[in-house]
Every structure is written in structure tokens, then in C-alpha cells.
Image: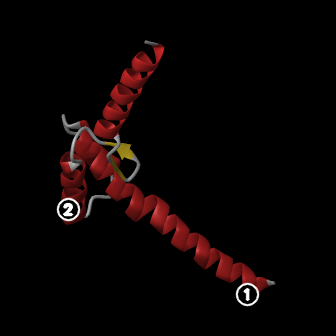
Amino acid sequence: MKMLFAMTLLVSVLGSTTATAATFDGYQCKGNCSGHQAGYDWAEQNDVDDESSCSTPSASFNEGCQSYIDENSGTTSGTTSSNDDDDDEEDDE
């Protein structure tokens, strides 16, 4: 009986994990991530660089929009700048 309960519990946990396992750039999706993708695409099309522009009633849209900003102004640019700085540092040495 304990084995049956454990198996049932395992199946239900795995089933719910599978349903929520989809992510979009680190954000959890509720379904197919279409809201996240729409926010990202909108931000890209409008060249958004200010997170206040990502304020809508849709949390998934906002997260997609924020993802675009993070990739294009914070993380990616910061990485590029760091690499440029590293090159300058190598020249100084």
C-alpha cells in the first residue's frame, strides 16, 4: 500500500513539474511561453531600454520585455564592456 501511495505521489509530482517546467530566459512559464515571447518581441521591435516600459497587466509579457532589456542593456552590454576593459587592461600590463 505504501508503494502504491509513493508511486501515485511521484506521478502527480512529475506531472505537475512537467506542466510548469517550461522557461523563457530563466522565467517560469504557465504554458507555452507565448506571453513571454510576445513581450520580448515587442521590446525588440520597439527598441525598449527602460524597464518602466515593461509595465502591463500581463506578468509574462512584462518578464519577456524585461528579458530583452537584460540581454541588450545589462548582461550583454556589460559583458562586452568587460571584455573591452580586459583588453585595455592587457594593454596596460
Question: Left of 7 or right of it: where is 79?
Answer: right
Question: Left of 85 or right of it: where is 45?
Answer: left
Q: Nearer the viewer, residue 83 or 16?
A: 16
Q: Disc 2 marks which residue?
A: 46
Any mark on residue 31, and which? none
The residue at the far right in this view is 93
Residue 59, horizontal then vertical, whole percent: 26, 37
Residue 57, horizontal then vertical, whole percent: 18, 34
Question: Left of 84 or right of it: where is 73?
Answer: left
Residue 63, horizontal then vertical, whole percent: 31, 45
64 up-or-down from 79: above or below: above
Residue 67, horizontal then vertical, whole percent: 35, 53
Residue type (three-letter) at the residue carrying disc 1: Asp
The residue at the far front in this view is 1
Label 1, label 2: how many angstroms apart (C-alpha)?
A: 38 Å
Q: Quadrant of the C terminus?
A: bottom right
Residue type (three-letter) at the residue carrying disc 2: Asn
Q: Disc 1 marks which residue?
A: 91
Instruction: Give the quarter of the image for residue 44.
Output: bottom left
Q: Which residue lies at the image location 32% right of the left edge and 39% below the top edge?
A: 18
Q: Which residue lies at the image location 38% right of the left edge and 64% below the top edge?
A: 72
Q: Which of 21 and 59 is in front in this view?
A: 21
| Label 2 Cα crowd, 10 Å radius (few <14 / some 14-19 / many 20+) | few
Q: The residue tagged with tag 1: helix, strand or loop?
A: helix
